[in-house]
Amino acid sequence: MSSNSHGRLLLIVGPSGVGKGTVVKILKERHPDWIFPVSSTTRLPRPNEQNEKDYYFFTSDEFDKKIHDNEFLEWAWVHSKERYGLQKSSVLPYLAAGKIVVRDIDIQGCEAIEEQLSRDEVISFFLLPPSREVLIERIRKRAPITDDELEERLKSMDMEIERGKNCDYQIQTINNQPELSVEEIERIMEES
């Protein structure tokens, strides 16, 4: 990465099932000096999840107050049930210190963040699925899903891919080779 006193927020964007989490996991292993902020949520912790390690767990009222106080870079309802978000305090101090911060996110979250931060602070990578068929297979393997739910997810994927053209870079993923996507991201970061 070129010398820049201000850090960069590296956004890994893409539809559900494309492998964002796997790419972030590999980046985390390869770049221990990069920052990987924890999300905030209104959902209850699952067994073995720890507050401030896995998520920042908030009540609905606490989350509302943080929204009112403009403490999020982005937040959203997920499946119309719970809210998730990224607190400014988990990102902005690290950017000011010149660090690289990495976040996997959906296209709506990416767009919300890009509205709040300057262009030189954010770099977005949209991961394209190897094929529609591979993505369908991945979605079906994750959990039981009805044909109607799958159809909704595919409509959402089509919308996300269209809007993903506005990201800084589009990376075609190769099935079962996430390290190739990571290497492409690293190469671009090194040159930017």
Image (tube, helix red, strand yellow):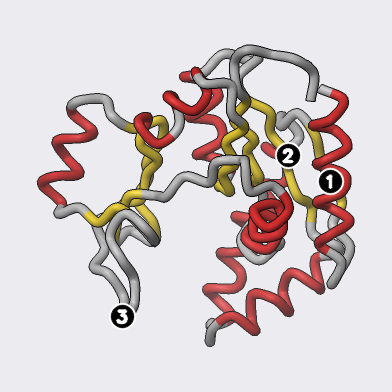
Q: Which mark is residue 96?
A: none
Indicate left or right for 8 with 113 as reference. Answer: right
For discs 3 and 2, the disc positioned in front in the rendered view: 3
Q: Position of residue 113 (x, y in %)?
A: 50, 28
Sequence order check: which comes first, mark 1 or mark 2?
2
Q: Position of residue 142 (x, y in %)?
A: 59, 80
What's the CA distance linking mark 1 and mark 2?
7 Å
Neighbor class of circle 3 (other Cα within 10 Å; few <14, some 14-19, many 20+) is few
Asked which quadrant contains residue 103, the reply is: top right
- SS type, badge 1: strand
Q: Which residue is mark 2?
A: 125
Q: Residue at x 80, y 66 (%)?
A: 132
Sequence order check: which comes first, mark 1 or mark 3?
3
Amino acid at dot 1: Ile
Amino acid at dot 3: Pro
What's the CA distance linking mark 1 and mark 3?
35 Å
Q: Are marks 3 and 2 in contact (CB under 8 Å)?
A: no
Q: Which residue is mark 3?
A: 47
Neighbor class of circle 1 (other Cα within 10 Å; few <14, some 14-19, many 20+) is some
Q: Residue at x 55, y 47 (%)?
A: 105
Where 147 falls versus 183 (above or below)?
below
Residue furthest to the left? 61
Amino acid at dot 2: Phe
Viewer-closest of 147 and 33: 33
Q: Which residue is mark 1?
A: 171
Asked which quadrant contains residue 129, the reply is: bottom right
Q: Position of residue 9 (x, y in %)?
A: 59, 30
